[in-house]
Image (cartoon, coloured by chain):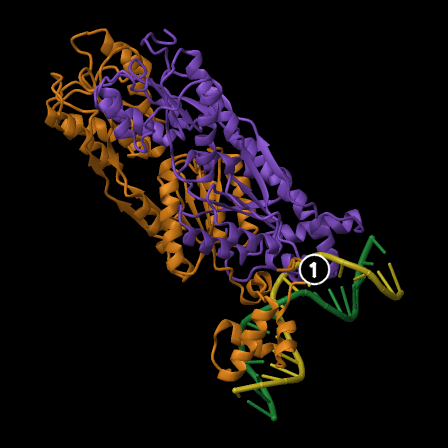
Chain colours: A purple, B orange, C yellow, D green
DNA sequence: CTGAAAGCGCTTACAG
DNA sequence: CTGAAAGCGCTTACAG
């Protein structure tokens, strides 16, 4: 119960206490064989009595490995990023890797600074969870240490591994769901200029074209304008919107409700990402779901392979559509009771 | 542009390249004085050419310090925890500390396991963001390394620093807001059995008593029962509820709306924590706000002091109430247009 | 201002 | 099965 912060016992102290050489202690505490059962017990006992713990720096220095992975996310406040982190962490548990997470604040400079700091700790690999990470920076790092990006930045160098969802499929699911309900005037609400958002935007256009539908003439860049268009009651106002992400879908619904437009009676809305929030809000949000934890697990697995010498891959996972109450037929009948 | 992963250059390589001794390289790269300007330039140049980076393990080993802080949170998915992490990270930036975050999954065993792993990396201090961390475990760790807890576990040992908000004040603000609007039948919806929730529950009772009001007879433990009571139209049904946290407030509102009870017309609701979510939902949630980033910054500051030898303190910060649209006078008139 | 030496705490061959 | 020695890459006194 005494304060153990002062002289931290070393392998040398344990050796003296147990009356053996340092080498033996090293073997014994690591559970290697080559130590007699009795001796081992005596050593472990001494280590325990002294409160011995292996010094991580000495160990890493001599072994040249840290058993450590750094994960950098754009923004921990996003449930998307957090779930990916969970996937990475859980997968790391089973491979005896320790993961250290840091947050890039959706800011290139902050991300870079935090990345450098993590790098200075000597991780064996890096996972970057970002759809907009700087390709040049990633190239620099990926040449120094194995690196996997979860998300969909453009121009990623071949040295970097990649895991992302198929945005084409996701947005296609959203559009098909709306047309199956009977919608024809379907607008798209774009998100950021990020590559993922761009892919969704394109898929929206392509799917509408395949279905013989026109893209909704004005694709307003902001929710407020879209709500105004619907509120005007014009004959060509959209009856449904597929959004580039949940965040903007939530904003759209908020503004629609504020303007007295019922959702889904006057406007059906589909989100993308299926954040926790989607199920809790009212109306609960129909949304495209990415298998986020799986993506995190895939990232860690690929990273482990790369650490082992494998080269980078490009993995694409398939999203699904989760139906809730923000979508209904255009006449206003609710989809479910 | 070649792959730098193989032979990583050491101080020795730089010394040879620059034609000086290793000691000089050490001084030069750390920016210490005692090196001539010319020599220094030559050394830095050589280091740059070779892509030299100081080996963190060797440095930590010899200095006995890692400049590293580990932050363990109960659940990164909670916006509360994430904001505290942001506060810690930003504060750490200015003290040249690197912070490594890990997630305890709201599970004692997971938390303990992750904590041990982080500890094995040799951080100089620990921040635990948890309102329910195991006191005995915290005691063990706090005796080995400086530790600060953000949150309000019970029975924390004196070795551990602490930062939390004043739950008494927060809940009092909520109740007073409701009585100022004219509510008299005010119920409380408890959260978990955590100490913070218990403190809020007590403060609710004390404040009601001070105001000469009765605690609402049945304090239903679950949102569904509360909604049923209000829906019954009974004369003593509550007209307002102050919730132990936002999460349960959101659930309550969802269930109320599902049951056709308008919020705030039929039921006013106040949350606690002011998560991002609170502003985005409809009706937007009136909620008690804790200065989360400040709390994180305080935690890091206190930890830095403890690393410097100071003893643990107990800091309490004051919450505020953020007014939104989920509360209104009991007659149903909206509080704002 | 500069260099040679010792040592941080561990692991890893290598002898016995 | 056990011990003595070298070395991981750095920093820190200590001489010159």
The C terminus of chain A lies in quadrant:
top left
Res A52 seen here: no
Q: Position of residue A193 (x, y in %)?
A: 40, 40
Quarter location, residue B311: bottom left
SS under mark 1: helix
| Relative to C13, B113 lies left or right | left
Res A40 seen here: yes
For label 1, the residue is A15
Q: Which chain carries label 1?
A: A
Looking at this view, is A27 or A56 the one in front? Answer: A56
Up/down of B101 relative to A144, above or below? above
Q: Where is residue A63 in the image (x, y as percent from the top left)?
A: 68, 57
| Relative to B317, A126 lies left or right | right
Residue at 37% x, 59% y: name it: B94
Up/down of A320 relative to B89, above or below? above
Circle 1 Cα neighbour tier, 10 Å, few/some/many (<14 / 14–19 / ≥20): some
| Relative to B155, B8 lies left or right | right
Q: Where is residue A35 in the image (x, y as percent from the top left)?
A: 79, 51
| Relative to A13, A152 lies left or right | left
Q: Position of residue B193 (x, y in %)?
A: 37, 28
Residue at 40% x, 25% y: name it: A271
Residue at 25% x, 15% y: name it: B218
Number of numbered tags placed on the structure image: 1
Looking at this view, is B286 or A221 the one in front? Answer: A221
């Amino acid at each position: 119960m005494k304060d153990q912060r002062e002289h931290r016992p070393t392998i040398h102290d344990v050796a003296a206490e147990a009356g053996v050489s340092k080498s033996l202690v090293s073997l014994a505490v690591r559970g290697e064989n080559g130590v007699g059962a009795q001796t081992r017990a005596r050593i472990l006992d001494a280590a325990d009595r002294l409160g011995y713990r292996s010094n991580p720096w000495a160990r890493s220095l001599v072994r040249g490995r840290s058993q450590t992975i750094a994960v950098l996310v754009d923004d921990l406040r996003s449930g998307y990023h957090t779930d990916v982190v969970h996937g990475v962490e859980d997968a790391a548990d089973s491979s005896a890797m320790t993961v250290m997470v840091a947050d890039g604040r959706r800011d290139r400079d902050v991300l870079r600074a935090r990345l450098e700091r993590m790098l200075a700790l000597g991780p064996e690999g890096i996972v970057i969870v970002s759809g907009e990470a700087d390709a040049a920076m990633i190239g620099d790092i990926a040449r120094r240490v194995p690196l996997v990006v979860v998300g969909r930045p453009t121009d990623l160098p071949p040295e970097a591994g990649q895991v992302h969802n198929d945005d084409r499929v996701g947005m296609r699911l959203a559009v098909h769901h709306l047309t199956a309900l009977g919608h024809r005037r379907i607008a798209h609400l774009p998100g950021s200029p990020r590559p993922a958002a761009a892919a969704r935007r394109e898929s929206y256009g392509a799917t509408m074209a395949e279905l013989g539908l026109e893209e909704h003439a004005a694709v307003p860049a902001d929710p407020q304008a879209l709500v105004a268009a619907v509120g005007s009651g014009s004959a060509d106002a959209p009856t449904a919107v597929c959004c580039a992400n949940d965040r903007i879908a939530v904003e759209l619904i908020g503004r629609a409700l504020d303007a007295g437009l019922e959702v889904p009676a006057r406007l059906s809305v589909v989100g993308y990402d299926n954040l926790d929030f989607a199920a809790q809000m009212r109306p609960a949000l129909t949304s495209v779901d990415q298998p986020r934890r799986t993506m995190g697990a895939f990232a860690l697995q690929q990273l482990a392979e790369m650490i082992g010498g494998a080269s980078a891959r490009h993995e694409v996972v398939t999203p699904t559509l989760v139906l809730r109450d923000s979508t209904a037929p255009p006449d206003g009948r609710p989809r479910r009771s």
